[in-house]
Amino acid sequence: MKAIINTKFLKNLFLFAVLFSSATVVIAQDDEEEGSKFSFSGSIDAYYRANLNAPNGADAQAPGSSFANLPGFALGMANVIGAYEGEKVGFVADLVFGPRGTDAIFASPMYSATGNIVNQLYAYWNVSDAVTLTFGNFNTFLGYEVISPVANFNYSTSYLFSYGPFSHTGLKADFALSDDFSLMLAVMNPTDLTEFNPTGQYAWGAQLGYSGQYLNLLIDNGSYEVDFTGGFDLSETFFLGLNAAYFDGDEEDGVGSFAGVAVYPQLATSDNFSIGLRGEYFAETDFFGAVGGTDADGDASVFAVTLTGSATIGDLMIKPELRLDSASEEVFIDSDGVPMAGLTSFVLAAIYSF
């Protein structure tokens, strides 16, 4: 069965490549006539990860956040993005391959086990200079961090990112209210159900932006999340990012709640090297279960500090990273098999973008 699945996957990949090449030729011809623009971009990433105070190998533990959780030398993902930007309309086809990509589309209910590789797939229409409509599957508008490692300063991800939504499928409208103010409104499938809607219910989203600061709201079938994302250039070399969120789960479905805040001070020491810190406090209630274990009251919490260096060599980024997770409960295991509350780990990542 595995051979059949792999054969089908390769055939589909080959067919996509042929169609993609054909589309590129046609669009290139149209570009000459209409001034439209087709782009092809993406990235690849790989990393090495080791625990400094806990076992490594098959029984290795990792922080309870998404991605960069595999022991030893490990793969991230290959990300391939084709985009067409016309005067009024365009599209984005964002495909992912590898463990990070699989984690990113974990809730795709039909095809995730048989080769779904779609991270984003949407078309848009610039109705006017102030209004854009987007239809399809797009990454979430909540949170400071994103799926692609190229756009994150830290390689490992935060708890706030990991337990917020990853992607949505639906229709959104973006409004440029002024030079500083923006507004987005959306109607979407339930969170992370990106292929189709098996429930018949819908989620609603809104975002109010002002000069790079964003207040986000997601209402989804009895649950809601309020999120603030922003940042400030405190000098030419020093940037401070901020993220805070509160999620209230549906009590009838037994979904708990969480709240957290993260700060991201980043200093550029030269044109080719920066150093940044992520300090995050994340607390859950009603046995949400994110930290990795809960106490008798269901209100476990974690404080995580991640120190990351970022060296740029052309289109290649090298990121060494030291991370310390300190939980309110003994959710980790030390080298002797004894429960402990803290985990110290090291990651070295390589990210190439094109």
Image (cartoon, helix red, strand yellow):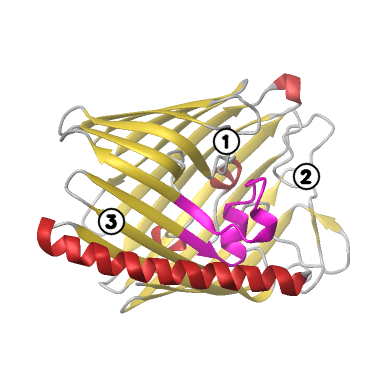
What residue is drawn where x is 25% and y is 72%? 271
- The amino acid type, in three-letter code, at marker 1 is Thr
Residue 52 shows up from this direction = no
Residue 61 falls left or right of residue 119:
right
- 342 or 81, which is in the foreground? 81
Query: Which numbered disc covers residue 329?
Result: 2
Query: Which numbered disc covers residue 332?
Result: none
Q: Is residue 108 magenta?
A: yes
What residue span does the magenta drawing correspond to? 95-120
Please tell me in which quadrant of the rendered image residue 70 appears: bottom right
Hey, which residue is sitting farthest right in the picture? Answer: 337
Is the residue under label 3 in contact with that under label 2 (CB below 8 Å)?
A: no
Please tell me in which quadrant of the rendered image residue 354 appears: bottom left
CA gap between label 1 and label 2 equals 29 Å
- The amino acid type, in three-letter code, at marker 2 is Glu
Disc 2 crowd rating (10 Å Cα; few below 14, some 14-19, many 20+) is some
CA gap between label 2 and label 3 equals 49 Å
CA gap between label 3 and label 1 equals 27 Å
Q: Tell me residue 19's x, y (percent).
A: 41, 66
Nearer the N terminus, badge 1 or badge 2?
A: 1
Residue 89 falls left or right of residue 109:
left
Nearer the N terminus, badge 2 or badge 3?
A: 3
Q: Quadrant of the N terminus?
A: bottom right
Residue 93 in the image: above or below residue 271? above
Residue tagged 3: 84
Residue tagged 1: 191
Q: Tell me residue 170's x, y (percent).
A: 46, 35
Residue 116 in the image: above or below residue 187? below
Nearer the N terminus, badge 3 or badge 1?
A: 3
